[in-house]
Image: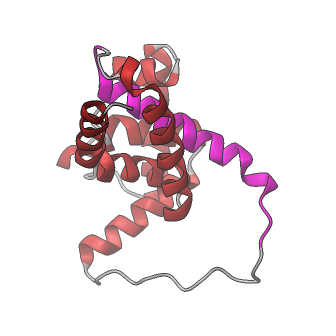
Amino acid sequence: MRPDLEHDYTQYVTARLPRLHRVAYQLVGDAHRADDAVQDALTTLYQKWARVREVANLDAYVHTMVVRAALADRRRLWSKVLLWDRPPDAVRAADGPDVERHMVLRDALRAIPEGQRTVLVLRFLCDLSVEEVAAVLGRSEGTVKSQTSHGIRALRRLLHVEDFFVLNGGAA
């Protein structure tokens, strides 16, 4: 790759890497698998950079790549072999009500169907519109709206709340 293209790629990825990792993590639920999904997507992006860097909505294009890599990882999961009898010790985050609420929400997100979780992550974590989520996932806007509604309803049921103040700070 030409040095100027490499520089543009590095600038682009550096600015967006934390957000891409958060998206992948919310979809796969594991930091290492999220790293792998993002790395797969960014490797493909690097190979195509000269052609795709001028697409109309590069961020949506890259989000689509990360989502597809994360979903492919979830599909491959059945073939993984557990090498230890228990997972390694997790790093503990700071305690507090926000951390606890985050962990409760994360667990609830993991408990809902994959399609609903994916739509909710893209809509509210990535702040994509219904149209953008539909394009990323290759689904109709009606399906995205339906999965958003069903996902929020499932979260409310799992969290035993009437007013769900998580997404955008207001009742959904």
Residue at 43%, 18% (x, y): give it. Answer: 135
Q: Which range is magenta?
A: 56-82
Residue at image position (29%, 31%) is 5
Q: Quadrant of residue 61?
A: top left
- In this view of the protein, can residue 170 be seen by the observer? no
* Near-viewer residue (164 or 22): 22
99 above or below 34? below
Q: Position of residue 16 (x, y in %)?
A: 27, 44
Q: Look at the image and tell me in which quarter the C terminus lies.
A: top left
Measured along the vertical axis of the image, is residue 13 above or below residue 77?
above
**Placement of 121 over or under 60, stated as above or below:** below
Residue at point 55%, 86% (across, down): 89
Residue occupying the far front of the picture: 2
Q: Position of residue 85 (x, y in %)?
A: 76, 83
- In the rendered image, residue 3 lying in the magenta stretch gets the answer no
Residue 109 in sight in this render: yes
